[in-house]
Image (cartoon, rainbow, N blue to C red):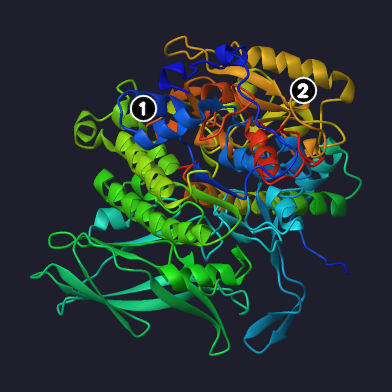
Amino acid sequence: MKRRDFITSTAAALVASPLMNFAKDKPLAKKMLVLGFDGMDPGIVNRLMGQGQLPNMQRLGEQGVFTMMRSTCPPQSPVAWGSFISGADPGVFGIFDFLHRDPETYIPLFSQSETLPSGMLVNLGHYRIPLKPGKVVLKREGRAFWDYMQDRDIEATIFKVPTNYPPSESSQRTLAGMGTPDIQGTYGIYSLYTSDENESQQDISAANIYYAYIDENNVMEGQIEGPKNNLVKDGEAIIVPFKVYVDNLHKTTRIDIQGKEILIAEKEYSDWVELEFSLISHLANISGMVKFYLMEMGERFRLYISPIHLNPRNPAVPISTPVSYSKELANKTGLFHTIGLPADTKALSNGTFSMENFITQSLSVFQESCRLFDYELQHFSSRQQGLLFFYFSSLDQGQHMFWALNDKEHPYYHAEESRKFGYIIDEMYRKFDRVLGKALKSIDPGIPVLVMSDHGFGPFRRSVNVNTWLVKEGYLKLSTNEINEEVSILEYADWPASKAYALGLNGLYLNLKGREKEGRVSTVERRKLLEEIKGKLETLSDPKNGQKVISCAYISEDNFSKNFLQRAPDIILGFDRGYRISDESALGSLSKEIVSDNLNWWSGDHCVDPKKVPASFIANFKIQKPVPDMQDVAPTILKYFGIATPAQMTGKTLI
Amino acid sequence: MSSKIKLSKEANQKADEIIAFHGYSSLEELVEDLINKEYEKIKSGDNKEELANKLSGLGYIS
């Protein structure tokens, strides 16, 4: 398909003619390559193709198809990639948002995995030893498409696909992606040592900020706070001390830690530094790794320490199948980031990183991903048959943070930063085009190649507190008259009097009798209430400019399969362009205003109406549907390998 | 297992008023309910902080 034929609206696409049908009964290919570029926006691809800046994507599309693909509702990565994995809509695999909630307690839960506690603990001197270890359970239901390939002895390598932590049981080579925590069980707590007293007193989330005291011998002593030691009675965090020898003359430091000496110059990153966190002296350790980043020396000393990643050589919890796969990768390519989303976006949001610092880190993550991709590409080329799926996170994380650089309407637009760094999003797309170009050169031209994303991107200019709206409309009652950020529905909701509440990035729930602990809404009034709330939400306008805030409120039971519908919000909030849920509302808190400016570098987003952020689909083969669905990709891959669409899948093959 | 607690006269009077107002059947029922509510408050607070940290790590909540 030529670029000029690119279909710019879903409506137009829906009436376009079907393309050629290549479907046959036997396997159509022995090998297939699928590249997952999270967040690749078809509108930006189309613009850059038009300027001749993405020659490899353009060539691929001209051989087959370049079109937009329907993302899931909501278009959040765990949901969309879950649909890719399962070949189905979210009702089948049971993930509807980053956050779900427990209707018994109203407490939000992380949707992708659940940590089950260890069994009974026995006291042994200073230690508490569990008789049965705890474990982490994947909450994605059903089979992954690569399981059906495994049934036919067809090899698949699935590299860092989101919504697969802990990796589902398989003999395929899989490495967990988004959802993989750091060693402390969070998604990334970094540390900063700073000689700036004001900065050291900041109280910010997901960061440990320390004052850097440098003595008269130019030595600073610090510590890295590891996981909590649940084997000892006080359960304190395990500490790894280190010393920094500061050489201001040569702008370098030496860091001594666990017998290692690391030399880094100002503005440089160290390599990965492996650390052992001792649970029981000489008997049980947890292995982690960090990178040091010497941000500043001289007038101000600032040393950033990355979150503690699980060490792929010896992860404390499995991050791959087989378990040895992560070790193989580390031994062949060097250590690599294991946290699901490795670029430290919150360090930029918090002001610890400048834009330049964040770009430096993003490029380092990208280069590391490319190194791993080269290895997997070689492995793929050496095989007679099989699938390689390789996922890159950089485009998604970059667009979240860089969007305002190119958006003069954004309340966080900074002209000076824009002048310096406004090129960066387009440059990232060009880099990904070169990744594709390299791949195309190294594989047989007959191999089907698909480049896809899970959603597109748009501006996040204004934050919407849906809980505040629910209070003002009388659907949510509180036991206080205060309405501000300190008021959480978890503490102040008058549940027996409340009809609805919002939790997660796109979810609105009814307070349903028989489902919620203190439900108010009866089965009889449920549907009418859903339609009433939907109608009101769709007329909600921004008091600042009169713009529509929610373009569509999707009633879940009309949109999803029933299998795991009980986990779903009753309404999925489809925000209009420029709007997203506020941080407070996502976790159940209120704000004074319903709509307010987003004053954060996290300025682009996709947790909106899926129609506003379609995904990208570029392939060297033709497809039958002008606008494919995310759930159609897995049946298409299986079809190439001669496998009929399994009953679980609600998607349809595209070939 | 039961435990005895001693309340001041003033606290006892307040407890009686709460029992009458909300319809608790006994002081024990009131105390147990208050403990449960306080416990849930603490647990939900912990969970909220943990979740905020987790989502903050992902970047979606600052």
The location of residue A469, given as percent across then percent down, is: 59, 22
User: Measuring 75% from the left and 36% from the top, which residue is drawn there?
Assistant: A91
Q: Is residue A147 left or right of residue A368?
A: right
User: Which chain is indicated by disc 1?
Assistant: A
Q: CA distance from mark 2 to mark 1?
A: 37 Å
Question: Quick one: label 2, few (<14), some, or many (20+) residues within 10 Å?
Answer: few
Q: Nearer the viewer, residue A242 or A233?
A: A242
Numbered disc in front, either 2 or 1 = 1
Q: Quadrant of residue A175?
A: bottom right
Query: Which mark is drawn over residue A49?
Result: 1
Q: Is residue A142 left or right of residue A597?
A: right
Quadrant including the C terminus of chain A? top right
User: Which chain is indicated by disc 2?
Assistant: A
Q: Is residue B62 left or right of residue A648?
A: left
The location of residue A80, given as percent across then percent down, is: 61, 38
Vertical placement of residue A107 versus A254, above or below = above
**Disc 2 designates what residue?**
A558
Q: Quadrant of residue A403?
A: top left
Visible residue check, residue A225: no
Q: Secondary structure at mark 1?
A: helix
Q: Secondary structure at mark 2?
A: helix
The location of residue A201, given as percent across then percent down, is: 33, 56
Vertical placement of residue A627 versus A601, above or below = above
The location of residue A66, given as percent across then percent down, is: 49, 28
The answer as to whether the residues below labels 2 and 1 share one chain is yes
User: Measuring 56% from the left and 32% from the top, which residue is drawn there?
Assistant: A590
User: Measuring 38% from the left and 44% from the top, which residue is drawn there?
Assistant: A437
Q: Quadrant of residue A123?
A: bottom right
Question: Quick one: label 1, few (<14), some, or many (20+) residues within 10 Å?
Answer: some
Identify the amino acid type marked 1: Met
